[in-house]
Amino acid sequence: MKNRNPETLKILGSFVVFYLLNAILLNLPFAYPETKISNGNWNWPGKLYAVLGSLIFLSIYRKFPLSDYFLTFKQEKKFIYTGVGIIVLLLLIHCVYAYLSPVKKFDLETLLFQFSMPGIDEEIAYRGIMLGLLLKVLKSKNIFLNPAIWTTSLLFGMAHGLFITENFELVFHLIPFLWASCYGLILGWITIKSGSILFALISHNLGNGVGMLIKMQ
């Protein structure tokens, strides 16, 4: 890590503020049912609030250009074929995992949600803003060993494996935590190598959507 100067502390503080903001907005419909603006079975409102929160954060905290958060369509040309290959490989892994998972009934809302919202919200937040901020203060010669990738991946894993019940009890699911953390590491590496969250977003939504489609009958 760089020297603990005021600028570094400000960036880390911004990271913490954004992480908490994202988590609060995502869970807002559960804590306050009156904010639930749709009657679907999935957390559409929370995802929309979280995406809106990301946009508001970017509009207020304008210290770095959007490209520093990998929020660009521009790709590193040398990585395009590698990126496509990794997306295909991850999709195959998703398919195998889904095939071995319990069968679910066909549900159009579920498919629409999985093909869209998780990737948009989580990639902008984790591989975009959070990873971009941490890379400003956490450095490593080896991209895959960069603490910024590991930190965002573990937080990504916790978001999928650690939950609070209605009785305010913590419930931890190991398999989803490990799966999401490992997936986050790969997506973080792809994002840095490609210079954009685009490959990660496509991989995320395709994996979720196709995987869910395979589970359904």
Image (cartoon, rainbow, N blue to C red):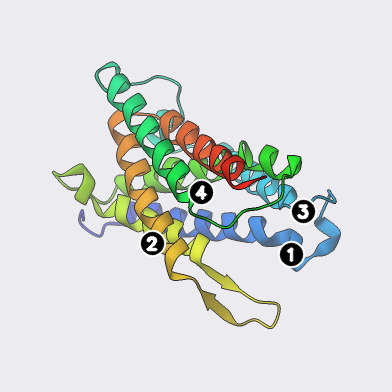
What residue does disc 1 label?
30
Q: What is the three-letter code of the residue carrying label 3?
A: Asn
Are the residues tagged 4 and 1 within 8 Å (C-beta)?
no
Residue farthest to the front, as pictured: 217
Give the numbered dot on residue 98.
Answer: 4
Of helix, strand and loop, which one carries label 1?
helix
The 10 Å Cα crowd at callout 1, few under 14, some 14 to 19, many 20 or more, is: some
Q: What is the three-letter code of the residue carrying label 4?
A: Ala
- Residue 119 x/y as whole percent: 54, 40
The answer for how far apart the CA atoms under marks 4 and 3 are is 20 Å
The 10 Å Cα crowd at callout 4, few under 14, some 14 to 19, many 20 or more, is: many
Q: What is the three-letter code of the residue carrying label 2?
A: Leu
Give the numbered dot on residue 41.
Answer: 3
Q: Earlier in the sequence, mark 2 or mark 3?
A: 3
The answer for how far apart the CA atoms under marks 2 and 3 are is 25 Å
The residue drawn where x is 56% and y is 79% is: 170
Q: Which of labels 1 and 3 is toward the front? A: 3
Q: Quadrant of residue 30?
A: bottom right
Q: Earlier in the sequence, mark 4 or mark 3?
A: 3
Pick the front one: 173 or 125? 173
Q: Which of labels 2 and 4 is toward the front? A: 4
Placement of 156 over or under 94, stated as above or below: below
What residue does disc 2 label?
178
